[in-house]
Each structure stands twice: as structure tokens, then as C-alpha cells.
DNA sequence: TACCTCCACGTTTTT
DNA sequence: CGTGGAGGTA
């Protein structure tokens, strides 16, 4: 079996899998078989007797990745992987905190706040403190608190230099106290609390350090500071941390990921040898060459070059549209063509930098009758009706959960108005107790306590009635008692919601309690019997794994998503649309530290998603924020060698005549290994240059030749905006811009490469 | 309490 | 241009 396991690994992969139990850093390029290495390493450690299943901790970022690891491992080893500590950082921390709730100073039934719950809680705290939400937007405060936690800092340890951070510090402190009172934790708190638990409890720390001799980390480049410290703490002096990552695919700095962790790891763990996995099993040569060339423009790299044993394949097809609608039209035509060639829609991806770009594409796809699926929408456990049902369940599990109570105390409406709720909040605040406790105390005041009393009784009656029931039955009974169903039956759009409530019951019935709470020999568990342990586990599951973005899987539909969402996926054909300055790279990134390099890594991720065919498209104009913007082609296009690109535009003449052909017909299908066609600029250089022909590439070349075609003060004429005066001229070459004050259209910034601007 | 209108805002997001 | 949140009105 051992030899089977290692069969088919390339030398680098083999070296990584069979590495001695010392800290190791594996630089795993896109498509280099990283997951395989990770899982085979675990299987190898177990099958050679170097580790027991309970002695391994493997951590990932997404539930999907964790599931995949479980699945692959189960296929390799004749063991039950469910009890193994394989999961997300948050999932594993949750597990640890559930086992040691007393030492972590949490109630056994502590609940987990998702981002929306967290924001609501911050708003509540800010309101109680009388803080102006205009000056201190709750979203930003929430974000700042999370950032502090992810850096491992409590409110007391915050250095507050300015007004904003002083406010954040105050809110943070009150927020933490309120969470503690209610027995709830947010996502970052799971990690921070687990970290603090391990640092303060020497016995526990030593237990886990002795137990987990092998710690394997996926997507190491995405770890934040706190996660790194958590790993370091667990590893102790001689834990073998096997870190797999790719600095070139680090695209989550904006949410706290710290690429620096890779270099820090190498240094602090005294990594002797970095193993690079550079053989790519996904893409053809041209695609990899393009990715390699692009990423060499980044200065901050550990260094790595992908290669493939496959052929060079086709060049990358570059299409330049006049408008965003026309760009979408081109994509639709090409997708239809690919489909005719037998490519399945599910194997074609449309990638964009920002979600707003999907609309135009969706319009075109819908009109053309092409089925598509957009990733990144509302997820199952985030739907309103599901959140309401979960709030009832949370109250049953832990009545001190104020957030849950506020959400449903008057939904469906039961005559508890804003005033009674405010009185209840005042009473609770005064006595330092939860809303639930205040409601039970009956000091809500006035007649409103009758309705509130009814609500309290309903919850208590329900809780008593579900004791001893199976999870599915509990969820069913609580939903029944809530009155949500009759409410949604009267709502005209309630059909789907009712269906989703049924689905929630099904999910609960099918919930694999064993997998969620399984322990293996050697686990320390604080086993005080809880009233409803299955419910706690299910609610944690709902918070930590919000469910798939959309149901209806398996359908043959085109895949639409942001580049971020595409990380880790691969497709036969990929369209990267909107490759324009300002969009991709995004303008907001340009003044951020390291912003442009992160954008470039994002582009690197986009390119490396494609197996066989890659389309790069951009548009001269685009509707954004209600007005048309004129953009230049993304610098990333220029950073890819021309020899790898094949322009596929219709010639201007054919365009004008409304013909549908796309540039140079046929060439390049199948296994052609050389790059076809004249170079991009050369091709356009020969295009007819009739007056006012809208051929931006011609303009590009012209602009390159003459640095500043216009001078400040010069009178000019624009085909659309009419006459005007140049008020500013900046940039040079293809980036040359002018600011023109138009007589009728006002002041506008124009990109000379594209604007139809002439001297007047 | 529910609906509607107006206004502000607009990069990426998992847990 | 579209959306979503907040606040005002019926």
C-alpha cells in the first residue's frame, strides 16, 4: 500500500511527501498537485506508523478544502477520518473551545455570530454608548475590531492614537463585555479565545503540543498574524509544521492575510529546505508562459517558475471591445462557438474583477438563452427566513442571546412594539442582565409585558417539549412553534421561503453529528452533559459553514465569478473580462501599499485557472456608476509578451459593416505549438487609418510615437462632447491623458489612446 | 406598522 | 445606473 500511495508522484512531490518530521515550507505553484501532496503526506505518515490519525492536525481556509481532504484521505486509507483534526482554523478552534468551554470562560452553549450578527451587535453597543454613527460608521468600527482581534490584541492592548481608534477601543471593550454576557463569540473571537486558552493553560498547551506532532497547513500565504501565532503555539519546540503555500497567489491581504508569514516561518522555524512544486499539470505552455512573464513584474517574491510537460497550446486571445455591451456580445458568441465544439458550459468560466461587472454579462447571456450560474450571492444560512429560524433555535439553546431575541421577539408580529423593546433594553442594561432575564423578571413595565410574557412562555414551552428529540425533530418543532410558516404563507413571495424552511429541517435531520463532534482517543473533553448538544453543534455548523451560494448544482451552466472566487478552481476555457486600467488593476489599489502587486497576483490567479484556452478582453468604454468611462487597456496586457497573444478583433472595416467575423479566422485550434498570426500591434499597425476610424490600437501606436500631442490651452474638438479647451495634459505614450473643458459637456478627463479628440 | 420615497454609494470576502 | 438603507408618511 505504501508504494501505491507514492505512485505517480514527481520527484519534488515525492520529496515533499516523504520529508522528515521537521518544519517544512512547500512552495506549491498553481496546478502543481498541492492538495495531493498534502493528503498523501498525511496518508504516508499514518501508513508508515510515524503518526496516528489522532496525532495529526491539518488546517485549511475553507470548508470545501477541508471536505476535499477528508474525501481524498478516506480513499487512500482504510480509516474513519471523521475524528481527525482536519478542518478550517475556525472549525478547529470551535472544536477546541467546545471541549474546554469552562477553561475558556464560555458557557457550554456559546453561539457563534456571523458577520451580519456581529454588525448588528456593534450597532447595538454603539447606540447604547450614544456614539454618532455618521462620524463612526458601524461597518468600519466592526472591521477595525476584527482587525485588532486578528492581530491578537484585546481592547486594553490597543494603541489608540487618533479619535477614531479611541472610539474603536471603547466600542471594542463594551462589545467584548456584551458578547461575554450573552455567551456569543464572533469569528475572530474563536481564534483569539483559542489562542489565549492555549497560552494561559500550560497543561492544555502541553497536551496539545504533545499530541499534534504533525501540523499541516494549506494556503499558508493566506494566514493572518493570529493564525500564525496560534500555529506556533501549538507546534511548540518540535512540532513538525508542514506549510504549503504560494506567495504569488496571495490575494487576501485586504482581509488580514499576511504573506510575510511565509518568510517569518522560514526564519523562525529554521526551515532548512524550501521545496518548490513547479511542474504544472493543468495548463498548456502559452498560458503558463504568460503567467510566469506577468508575475516577474512583482518585486516581492520568493521566486518560482511554472512549467509543463504538455505542449504549448494556443496563444491567448485578446479582444478589444468598443463598449462593455459589445464585450459581452463577443463573449456570448465565443461561448456559443465553444459549446458547438463540444465544450461543456460548466467547463467555461467568466472571471471579472468586481461583482458589478456581472450584470452586463448576465444580460447578454440571458438574451442569448445561455444558462449560467453566478457565484457569490446570498448563501443558504444567510437567507432571511433561515436566519429567523436559527434565531429561534439559538434562543432555545441559549436564551441570553440578545441578538437572537431581538431578531424574533416581534417576528412574526405579536404586538411587541419598539417602545416595549426599548423598555426591556433599559431594564436589562440597568440590572446588567440579558434581555431574556429582564423579560422573565416581568419588569418590562405596563401592559406590554403581557405580550412579552407570551413570547417567553412560547420559547420555554418549546424548549421543554423538544428535550430528548432527534435534531431534525427539534428544528421542526421549533419552526412550528415560531409561527414563521403561517407568516410566510400570507406573504406573496413566501413560497421559496417556506421551501427553505423545509430544507432547513432536512439539513438538520441529515446533519452528521458524529462528524461534527467526534472525538478520538486522547481528546480531553469537558463532558458536562448539555441539554441539547446536537443543537449547539448544528448551530455552530450553520454559522461556520453558511452553505453553498446556490442550489441547483450539477447543471451544465456557464460559471460566472470574481477572480477571487475562482482561486483553486480550473476550467477548460476562461474569459477574463474588463482588463482595463482602473478596473483591473483596480484604481483603489494603486495608492495602497503593495496594492499593484496584489492586483498582479490576482491577474496571475486568473490566468492560471485556464487549462486550454484563455480569452483576455477589454473595452474602450464602460458604464460605471451611472456614467460612461473611457479606459485604457490594462498594463497587465502589456506585461505579457506579445508573442503569446493573438488579437482576435474584427478589422475596423468589417466592424463598420456590421460583420460578425473575429479577426484572423481559424488558426490556433488543436495542438498547434507555435504562436499564430502577426503580433498584436503589428497587425493593427497595418489597419486602414481612415479619418476618425475608431481603432484604438492605431491611436495607441500614434500616442507612443508622439509623447504629448496636445498642449494646455489648445482648442480641441471631440466627436461626442464637441468643442473644448485643454486644461491639463499628463502622462505619455499610451497613457497620455488630457483634461478638457468642453463648452457644452463640462470638464472631462480623456485618455488620448481612445478619445476621438482632434485639434481645432 | 408598513410601505414608499429619497438619498448615498459603488473592489475583492471566508469564517 | 442600480441597489440598499434610512427615514418619513399614511
Image (cartoon, coloured by chain):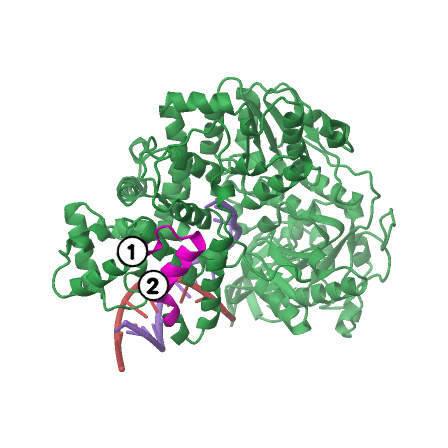
Chain colours: A green, B purple, C red
Magenta-tinted stretch: A463-486
- Front residue (pair A338, A240): A240
Q: Quadrant of the N terminus of chain A?
A: top right
Q: Is residue A298 visible?
A: no
Q: Which picture quadrant has residue A153?
A: top left
What's the mark number on residue A44? none
- Front residue (pair A502, A529): A529
Q: Locate residue A551, reporting x and y percent.
A: 57, 60
Q: Residue at x 59, y 29 (%)?
A: A243
**The disc numbered 1 marks a residue on which chain?**
A
- Front residue (pair A160, A379): A379
Q: Locate residue A489, reporting x and y percent.
A: 41, 74
- Crowd rating for badge 2 (residues with CA inside 10 Å; few <14, some 14–19, many 20+): some
Horizontal side, residue A653 vs residue A58: left or right:
right
For mark 2, what is the residue?
A481
Q: Locate residue A357, reporting x and y percent.
A: 58, 61
Q: Is residue A132 visible?
A: yes
Q: Does the magenta-highlighted stretch encompass residue A106?
A: no
For mark 1, what is the residue?
A405
Q: Main secondary structure of the magenta part?
A: helix
Q: Secondary structure at mark 1?
A: helix
Q: Secondary structure at mark 2?
A: helix
Horizontal side, residue A511 vs residue A171: left or right:
right
Q: Locate residue A732, reporting x and y percent.
A: 63, 49
Cβ atoms under marks 1 and 2 closer than 8 Å? no
Amino acid at each position: 500500500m505504501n508504494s501505491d500511495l507514492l505512485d505517480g508522484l514527481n520527484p519534488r512531490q515525492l520529496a515533499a511527501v516523504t520529508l522528515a518530521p521537521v518544519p517544512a515550507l512547500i512552495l506549491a505553484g498553481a496546478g502543481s498537485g498541492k492538495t495531493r501532496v498534502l493528503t498523501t503526506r498525511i496518508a504516508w505518515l499514518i501508513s508508515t506508523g510515524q503518526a496516528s490519525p489522532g496525532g495529526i492536525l491539518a488546517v485549511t481556509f475553507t470548508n470545501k478544502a477541508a471536505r476535499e481532504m477528508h474525501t481524498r484521505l478516506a480513499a487512500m486509507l482504510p480509516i474513519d477520518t471523521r475524528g481527525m483534526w482536519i478542518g478550517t482554523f475556525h472549525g478547529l478552534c470551535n472544536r477546541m473551545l467546545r471541549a474546554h468551554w469552562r477553561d475558556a470562560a464560555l458557557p457550554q452553549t456559546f453561539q457563534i455570530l456571523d458577520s451580519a450578527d456581529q454588525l448588528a451587535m456593534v450597532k447595538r453597543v454603539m447606540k447604547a454608548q450614544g456614539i454618532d454613527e455618521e462620524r463612526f460608521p458601524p461597518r468600519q468600527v466592526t472591521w477595525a475590531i476584527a482587525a485588532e482581534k486578528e492581530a491578537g490584541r484585546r481592547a486594553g492592548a490597543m494603541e489608540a492614537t487618533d479619535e477614531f481608534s479611541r472610539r474603536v477601543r471603547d466600542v471594542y471593550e463594551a462589545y467584548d463585555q456584551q458578547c461575554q454576557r450573552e455567551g456569543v463569540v464572533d469569528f475572530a473571537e474563536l481564534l483569539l479565545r483559542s489562542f489565549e486558552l492555549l497560552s494561559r493553560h500550560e497543561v492544555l498547551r502541553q497536551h496539545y503540543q504533545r499530541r499534534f506532532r504533525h501540523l499541516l497547513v494549506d494556503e499558508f500565504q493566506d494566514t493572518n498574524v493570529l493564525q500564525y501565532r496560534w500555529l506556533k503555539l501549538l507546534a511548540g519546540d518540535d512540532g513538525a509544521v508542514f506549510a504549503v503555500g504560494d506567495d504569488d497567489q496571495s490575494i487576501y491581504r485586504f482581509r488580514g492575510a499576511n504573506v510575510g508569514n511565509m518568510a517569518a516561518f522560514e526564519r523562525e522555524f529554521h526551515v532548512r529546505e524550501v521545496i518548490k512544486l513547479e511542474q504544472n499539470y493543468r495548463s498548456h505552455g502559452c498560458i503558463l508562459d504568460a503567467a510566469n512573464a506577468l508575475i516577474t513584474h512583482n518585486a516581492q517574491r520568493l521566486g518560482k517558475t511554472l512549467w509543463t510537460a504538455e505542449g504549448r497550446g494556443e496563444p491567448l486571445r485578446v479582444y478589444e471591445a468598443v463598449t462593455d455591451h459589445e464585450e459581452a456580445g463577443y463573449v456570448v458568441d465565443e461561448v456559443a462557438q465553444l459549446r458547438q465544439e463540444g465544450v461543456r458550459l460548466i467547463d467555461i468560466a467568466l472571471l471579472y474583477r468586481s461583482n458589478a461587472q456581472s450584470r452586463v454579462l448576465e444580460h447578454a447571456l440571458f438574451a442569448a438563452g445561455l444558462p449560467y450560474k453566478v457565484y457569490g450571492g446570498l448563501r443558504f444560512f444567510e437567507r432571511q427566513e433561515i436566519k429567523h429560524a436559527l434565531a429561534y433555535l439559538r434562543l432555545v439553546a441559549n436564551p441570553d442571546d440578545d441578538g437572537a431575541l431581538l431578531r424574533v421577539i416581534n417576528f412574526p408580529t405579536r404586538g411587541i412594539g419598539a417602545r416595549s423593546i426599548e423598555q426591556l433594553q433599559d431594564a436589562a442594561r440597568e440590572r446588567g442582565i440579558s434581555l431574556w432575564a429582564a423579560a422573565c423578571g416581568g419588569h418590562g413595565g405596563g401592559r406590554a409585558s403581557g405580550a412579552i410574557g407570551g413570547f417567553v412562555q412560547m420559547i420555554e414551552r418549546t424548549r421543554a417539549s423538544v428535550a430528548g428529540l432527534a435534531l431534525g425533530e427539534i428544528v421542526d418543532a421549533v419552526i412550528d412553534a415560531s409561527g414563521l410558516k403561517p407568516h410566510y404563507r400570507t406573504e406573496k413571495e413566501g413560497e421559496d421561503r417556506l421551501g427553505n424552511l423545509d430544507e432547513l429541517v432536512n439539513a438538520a435531520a441529515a446533519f452528521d453529528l458524529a462528524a461534527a463532534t467526534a472525538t478520538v482517543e486522547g481528546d480531553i473533553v469537558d463532558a458536562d452533559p448539555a441539554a441539547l448538544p446536537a443543537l449547539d453543534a448544528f448551530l455552530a455548523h450553520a454559522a461556520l459553514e453558511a452553505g453553498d451560494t446556490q442550489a441547483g448544482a450539477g447543471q451544465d451552466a456557464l460559471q460566472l465569478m470574481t477572480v477571487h472566487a475562482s482561486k483553486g478552481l480550473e476550467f477548460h476555457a476562461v474569459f477574463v473580462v474588463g482588463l482595463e486600467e482602473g478596473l483591473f488593476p483596480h484604481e483603489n489599489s494603486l495608492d495602497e501599499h503593495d496594492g499593484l502587486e496584489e492586483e498582479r497576483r490576482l491577474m496571475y490567479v486568473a490566468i492560471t485557472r485556464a487549462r486550454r484556452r484563455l480569452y483576455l478582453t477589454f473595452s474602450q468604454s464602460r458604464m460605471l456608476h451611472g456614467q460612461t468611462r473611457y479606459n485604457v487597456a490594462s498594463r497587465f496586457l502589456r506585461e505579457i509578451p506579445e508573442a503569446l497573444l493573438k488579437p482576435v478583433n474584427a478589422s475596423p472595416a468589417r466592424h463598420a459593416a456590421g460583420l460578425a467575423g473575429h479577426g484572423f479566422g481559424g488558426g490556433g485550434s488543436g495542438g498547434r505549438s507555435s504562436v499564430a498570426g502577426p503580433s498584436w500591434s503589428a497587425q493593427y499597425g497595418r489597419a486602414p487609418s481612415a479619418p476618425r476610424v475608431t481603432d484604438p490600437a492605431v491611436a495607441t501606436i500614434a500616442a507612443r510615437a508622439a509623447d504629448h500631442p496636445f498642449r494646455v490651452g489648445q482648442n480641441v474638438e471631440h466627436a461626442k462632447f464637441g468643442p473644448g479647451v485643454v486644461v491639463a495634459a499628463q502622462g505619455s505614450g499610451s497613457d497620455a491623458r488630457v483634461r478638457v473643458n468642453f463648452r457644452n459637456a463640462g470638464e472631462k478627463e480623456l485618455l488620448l489612446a481612445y478619445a476621438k479628440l482632434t485639434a481645432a
